[in-house]
C-alpha cells in the first residue's frame, strides 16, 4: 500500500499470562502501543490466563499495582482493532465475552461506524491465524 | 531538576516531566510553560486539559498521531491537525503538552 514504509508485515502479539504478578501483560501492551506507530498489520491474541487481562471491572488496590486495563480501550485509537480471544480459554475459566472489556474501534472505511474489536475464536481458528503471521511476539 | 512554585519545590526528571503526578496544579503547569518559553493561551489549555482527561480515562498519554485525531474529533478539524498543534507546542504537541499537563512522556513516543 504505502511505498515509503516498505512492505507491511503481519504482526501478532500473543498474551498468555495473567495481568498482574508478572510484568508480561503490561510490557506487551506498551510494545503494542509503541509498535502501532509503524503502520503494520497488527493483531492481538489472548489465550490461557492471558484472557484475564481483558476482564472488565479490575481492581488492583489489594495488589498495589496500577490498574492498566483502561488502556486496552485506547487500542482502537491506535488502529489496533483485531483482538482475538480463544474460546477454549474463556470456557475453561467460566468466562464469556460479556465478562470482557467492550473494546471498540471506528471503521474508517465504513463512515467511522463503531465496531467491536474483540473476536472470540476457537483454538483451531487461532492456529490458522498464527500460521499466516510474519512475526509472532509471545508474552 | 526542580521547579519552584508558590514557595514549594516540585521535583522533575532530567527532561522536565513531573516526578510525582499529584504535584500538578494550574500554577505548576504555568511554571513548566514558562520554563518551556510558552505563553499559555486558552488554546493551549484546551489541549492540556484534553490530555489530562485522556489520561484519566485510558491511563496513558496518547501518541501524537492519536492525539491529533482525537482533538479533531472533539474540538473540530481546524484544531485536529499537526500544523495547529505544532504552532501551539513547537517542541511537539504530545511531548510538550504532556509535560505541561503533568503527565509522563507519551506512550508510543519513540
Image: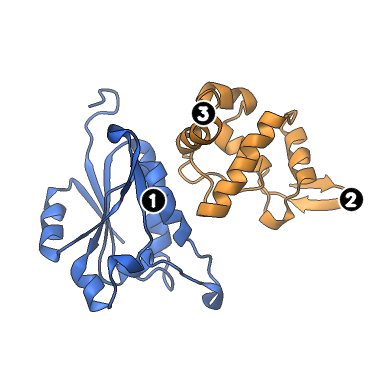
Chain colours: A blue, B orange
Label 3 marks which chain's residue? B
Residue at the disc numbered 2: B7
Of labels 3 and 2, the one closer to you: 3
> What's the mark number on residue A31?
1
C-alpha distance separating marks 1 and 3: 26 Å
At x 59%, y 43%, the residue is B51
Instruction: Answer whether residue B104 is visible to the viewer in this image.
Output: no
Q: Secondary structure at mark 3?
A: loop
Instruction: Answer whether residue A23 is visible to the viewer in this image.
Output: yes
Measured as percent of width and height from the top left, residue A62 is found at: 54, 78
Q: Which badge, 3 or 2, comes first in the chain's sequence? A: 2
At x 28%, y 39%, the residue is A40
Q: Secondary structure at mark 2?
A: loop
The lab-note entry on whether marks 1 and 2 share a chain reads no
| Residue neighbourhood size for the residue with mark 1, other residues' Cα within 10 Å, grouped as few (<14), some (14–19), many (≥20) | some
Label 2 marks which chain's residue? B
Which one is in front, B73 or B84? B73
At x 75%, y 28%, the residue is B39
| Residue neighbourhood size for the residue with mark 2, other residues' Cα within 10 Å, grouped as few (<14), some (14–19), many (≥20) | few
C-alpha distance separating marks 1 and 2: 40 Å
Q: Secondary structure at mark 1?
A: helix
Which one is in front, A96 or B41? A96
At x 39%, y 38%, the residue is A37
> What's the mark number on residue B80?
3
Label 1 marks which chain's residue? A
Of labels 1 and 3, the one closer to you: 3
Decide if residue A81 is on the left or right side of residue A126: right
Amino acid at each position: 500500500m504505502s511505498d515509503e514504509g516498505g512492505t507491511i508485515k503481519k504482526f501478532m502479539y500473543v498474551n498468555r499470562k495473567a495481568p498482574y504478578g508478572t510484568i508480561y501483560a503490561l510490557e506487551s501492551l506498551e510494545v503494542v502501543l509503541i509498535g502501532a506507530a509503524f503502520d503494520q498489520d497488527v493483531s492481538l491474541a489472548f489465550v490461557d490466563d492471558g484472557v484475564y487481562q481483558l476482564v472488565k471491572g479490575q481492581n488492583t488496590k489489594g495488589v498495589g499495582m496500577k490498574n492498566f486495563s483502561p488502556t486496552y480501550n485506547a487500542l482502537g485509537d491506535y488502529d489496533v482493532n483485531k483482538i482475538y480471544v480463544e474460546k477454549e480459554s474463556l470456557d475453561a475459566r467460566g468466562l464469556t465475552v460479556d465478562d470482557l472489556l467492550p473494546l471498540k474501534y471506528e471503521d474508517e472505511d465504513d463512515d467511522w461506524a463503531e465496531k467491536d474489536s474483540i473476536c472470540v475464536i476457537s483454538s483451531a481458528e487461532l492456529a490458522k491465524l498464527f500460521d499466516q503471521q510474519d512475526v509472532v511476539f509471545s508474552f | 531538576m526542580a521547579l519552584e512554585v508558590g514557595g514549594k519545590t516540585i521535583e522533575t526528571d532530567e527532561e522536565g516531566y513531573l516526578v510525582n503526578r499529584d504535584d500538578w496544579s494550574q500554577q505548576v503547569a504555568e511554571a513548566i510553560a514558562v520554563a518551556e518559553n510558552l505563553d499559555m493561551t486558552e488554546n493551549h489549555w484546551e489541549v492540556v486539559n484534553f490530555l489530562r482527561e485522556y489520561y484519566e480515562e485510558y491511563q496513558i498519554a496518547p501518541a501524537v498521531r492519536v492525539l491529533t485525531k482525537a482533538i479533531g474529533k472533539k474540538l473540530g478539524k481546524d484544531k485536529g491537525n499537526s500544523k495547529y498543534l505544532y504552532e501551539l507546542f513547537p517542541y511537539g504537541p504530545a511531548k510538550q503538552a504532556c509535560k505541561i499537563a503533568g503527565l509522563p512522556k507519551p506512550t508510543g513516543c519513540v
